[in-house]
Amino acid sequence: MVTDALLIARAAWSRLVEPGDAVAGALVAALGPQEALDWLRGHEPLPGLAAADGRARAALGAAAQRWRTRLPDLDAARDLGMLERVGGRLLVPEAPGWPRGLEVLGSSAPMCLWVRGSLAGEALGAALRRSVALVGARACTGYGEHVTAEIAAGVAARGWCVVSGGAYGIDAVAHRAALAGDGTTVAFLAGGVDRLYPAGNTELLRAVADAGALVSEVPPGSVPAKVRFLQRNRLIAAVSGATVVVEAAWRSGALSTARHAASLLRPVGAVPGPVTSASSAGCHRLLRDGVAVCVCDTAEVLELVEPVPAPEPRTDPRAGDGLDLVLRRTLDALPLRRPAPEGSVARTAGLSEREVRASLGRLELAGLAVRDAHGWRRANPDRSR
Amino acid sequence: MVTDALLIARAAWSRLVEPGDAVAGALVAALGPQEALDWLRGHEPLPGLAAADGRARAALGAAAQRWRTRLPDLDAARDLGMLERVGGRLLVPEAPGWPRGLEVLGSSAPMCLWVRGSLAGEALGAALRRSVALVGARACTGYGEHVTAEIAAGVAARGWCVVSGGAYGIDAVAHRAALAGDGTTVAFLAGGVDRLYPAGNTELLRAVADAGALVSEVPPGSVPAKVRFLQRNRLIAAVSGATVVVEAAWRSGALSTARHAASLLRPVGAVPGPVTSASSAGCHRLLRDGVAVCVCDTAEVLELVEPVPAPEPRTDPRAGDGLDLVLRRTLDALPLRRPAPEGSVARTAGLSEREVRASLGRLELAGLAVRDAHGWRRANPDRSR
């Protein structure tokens, strides 16, 4: 049962701690959010902690000192009020719709998710269960934009939710292409969902909220500090069925998302690009390091999340395909214009006359060889050399 | 000891069989080239073959029928004379300089190599021991040409021999760039070394012969039939320390070279390109299938053959790199302009005042934080967001 007290306690914890605080996560899991908060406020000795070893006691003591610096300013009801004013709702692990993917984070999982948009609760959880993260450089190229738009549109058209980080560049193109195709898209933000950051993406983020959702693990009013970007990246990696880096420089935040995803054993894809482009160097690095699989289009991206038995052929089969070696050599030995007798074909092919005779019969049946009074020749000019 | 009789016998076998004939290879290995030839000519029952099982007898019988179709025209002395006239020499497995890489082919190894050029015997063997194959599409793009030229020049400048197939496109650019840098280069041809095929590369192949070598396993006068290209590819894969595909369409002969190399457990590299370019689809296919490692420049190509312990950093480290999380969070919490007191920094960072105090001291020492009467601020604007 999700009570208001539970919502307030979890909202409070998300204000007190920085994202990814595993000590807080373990404490809240052990005591429950409200009880853990009561303990933090009360300065009581923790029940059972006397039995714990010295290191655990020291870690908890140091952590509690950190959390207590923010107790004086704490006002979870005010934070929840700010969320309500932007039309948002708090999603907690105890509620249906909590993204299953976050379970893999264990004690480092978020205390709650501050969700703003039309997609909330169970609908959000369902969308994220069929989601692909498309991430990449803010400073992207026209090539990166083009490929991102193609893949995001394709993924969305196949009913998959496009997850990204709401940033300039690849993120923005991914959200925009999903929206353009009436698809579902969710932006995970490093700051509060009341701040549409970066400012240049205000309109886009508003549109993402209208059609999908903005999600953050830090309360409204929180600034998108740099460490929060790194922690936000782990959320994107955890909630998405697969993470794909479309374009990224040698050093790019997108690589941290990819490495998070790989460490969580989630499929990771990287789109290659020209080796002469610095904006693809990070993708090539992921491919080289074996962190990512090479993906070139929507179909290959979706193979990461729903593997298919056999890829479709890309080109029409050519004449002579699938022939065994003896047939192949016989076919190669056939003159294009002036017919040659069987013995001559055998010598050219380095085959016995008996082998050549049998092969020519099969090639004739296949429409690849033609016989006349003077011997054998090819049925039609070969296109492939 | 390499006698004239041995050279003639091996030359004869290379005329009688098609490349990769493992039955012939096994027979020649068992009896010796001359004795095997005597047997083929004499129609005598093979010593010990009565003891062999029925399938082996049948396979040898069928193979002998194939080989015998070419016995009437056989004239190994004439073939060797043709080689001499173009300044070539026959290299046999019994001679020093026989490429060690070919041993991996076992019974399918060539009977001999017809070598034309300034690089012969032991010098050829030594060059191939330090070689990289650069192969790719005939129909290459400007991008492919550019990257091939860069890598071939770089590889040659580091004293490595550039091996390729003498074809149009990537092959030609690889040979040309190696020659331009006074490097060593060897072309493995699918036809006889007397035929400078394709015709448009005549001048280039002559230059390759002048500075390096043209090599084939089929005798002079042999046409470059299609199956011979596939067998030639296995030679390139076997003799080279690594095989790199620079640009190749979804279906390209270069992929067969890469797959040969992989099956021989030789390192394989593929250069990525734009996913919008059909000429890179084969490279991406190799990356996706895990056949090839992603390589972007000369250094990464040479890592395939001489692994290095650690890659060089590509960019200057940024301010804040390598800081632990507490320092990182403290640094993030520092205002850029108006100084803030320690308590405020602690609240922003979500750290205890004690942690923040220690961190600020370390950041000040590192030149990242500045203190004045009003508190702390960052030492200089951060460039990285």
Image: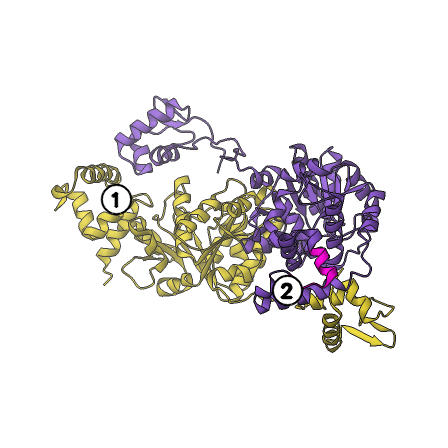
Chain colours: A yellow, B purple
**Which sits in the foreground, B169 or B348?**
B169
Q: Is residue B40 magenta?
A: yes
Numbered range of the magenta stretch: B36-46
* Residue situated in front as seen by the camera: A179 or B166: B166
Q: CA distance from mark 1 to mark 2?
A: 52 Å
Chain for numbered disc 2: A
Q: Are marks 1 and 2 in contact (CB under 8 Å)?
A: no
Classified by dominant secondary structure, the portion drawn in magenta counts as: helix
Q: Nearer the viewer, residue A14 or B24?
A: B24
**In terms of secondary structure, where does tag 2 sit?**
loop
Which disc, if any, is residue A266? none
Q: Quadrant of residue A115?
A: bottom left
Residue under label 1: A23
Would you say B172 lies left or right of A143 here? right
Front residue of B312 and B78 = B78
What residue do we see at 35% from left, 55% from top? A102
According to the picture, the residue beneath numbered tag 2 turns out to be A314
Q: Are marks 1 and 2 on the same chain?
A: yes
Question: Residue A34: percent from the left, percent from the top?
Answer: 20, 52
Q: Amino acid at mark 1?
A: Val
Q: Residue, x 34% and y 21% (percent of image)?
A: B373
Which circle's residue, 1 or 2, is located before the other in the chain? 1
Residue B87: x, y in percent?
A: 82, 40
What residue lies at 20% left-to-right and 53% top-to-bottom?
A: A32
